[in-house]
Amino acid sequence: MTEKPSDIARTVLRVESAALNQLVEELPADFDAVVSHLISLPGRVVVSGIGKSGHIANKIAATLASTGTPSQCVHPAEASHGDLGMITGDDVVIMISNSGETRELADIIAYCTRFDIPIIAITKRSDSTLAHAATYVLKLPSAPEACAIGMAPTTSTTLAMALGDALAVALMKQRGFDRENYATFHPGGALGAQLLRVSAIMHRDNALPTVTPNTPMGETLIVMSAKGFGVAAVIDQGKLKGVITDGDLRRNLDRLTNCTAGEVATPHPFCIAPDALLTEALAEMNANQISTLMVTENGSLLGLVHIHDLLRAGVI
């Protein structure tokens, strides 16, 4: 009977999962030394590999760069035709080769040896040419490939990529790399939107629908209509004293023309700080079923953020 694809998938995942667990127990002895070297590195981390290892090299370089460790990937074939000039004496080179005998890495190894550039080897064989040339060896555990013929890079590339992630996260922790730093490198897309601060999109100054407590409601309605947010902020000597919403207008409809803004406003409105994340602003709006938040600091009105602003920013 032919084996079902789902059974094959489970087998592959079990093999790779077992190898990852083995890596946890057999974490390379040089790991701490590598992190210590990279944390004080004046240059860049250059990552290289060929074939599937080359794809992993690209991923490791991208992860390092996006988490605070300057990094780039150099293709071994291009390195032999001029791109060795991308590698400087301030750099360190991570080379990925399961066997440690990848011929295409020979020119980079020779270049690094000639100019005393440290090499970090990610390989399964500690007795290989690459391992002998390396300053540090991050040895992968001996684990079978997950493919049917035991030859296609599957488990080995999974282990190399996981080890690269472990390096990146360890370096993040050592650097104190936080969400604000991360936002600097990820300004685009939904991820960037989630890391934006309220101050980045809030409406300010003349765009704000502000009135004083003594402003007649007739004038207040004109301000609310002109500014287009459906609210008015009641300000007294720079301090936010209340907010007038459509709900306040409905509740006071029978006496509205005889009132001032201060008499109609709801005191102690929902507010948010300018350095709060947009995701926090959205949570506050959802929790209180409101569409607008006043942005304040020490009681002073700095701005206003509307749910449509969050929509435009990509948070929703």
Image (cartoon, helix red, strand yellow):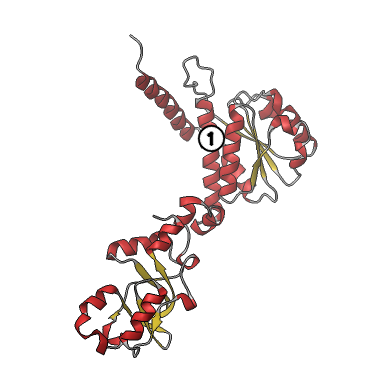
Horizontally, residue 68 falls left or right of residue 193, namely right
18 or 85: which is nearer to us?
Answer: 85
Question: In x, y percent, where is residue 19?
Answer: 46, 28
Residue that sits furthest to the left in the current view:
254
- The image quadrant that residue 304 belongs to is bottom left
Q: Quadrant of the C terminus?
A: bottom left
Total residue callouts: 1
296 or 46: which is nearer to us?
Answer: 296
Q: Residue at x 53, y 37 (%)?
A: 163
Question: In x, y percent, where is residue 157?
Answer: 54, 29
Horizontally, residue 81 falls left or right of residue 17, namely right
Q: Residue at x 68, y 37 (%)?
A: 74
Residue matched to label 1:
161
189 or 227: which is nearer to us?
Answer: 227
Q: Up-down: is 116 above or below 153? A: below
Inspect the image, locate mark 1, and give the three-letter code of the amino acid beneath it.
Met
- The image quadrant that residue 245 belongs to is bottom left
Residue 30 shows in this picture: no
Residue that sits furthest to the right in the current view:
114
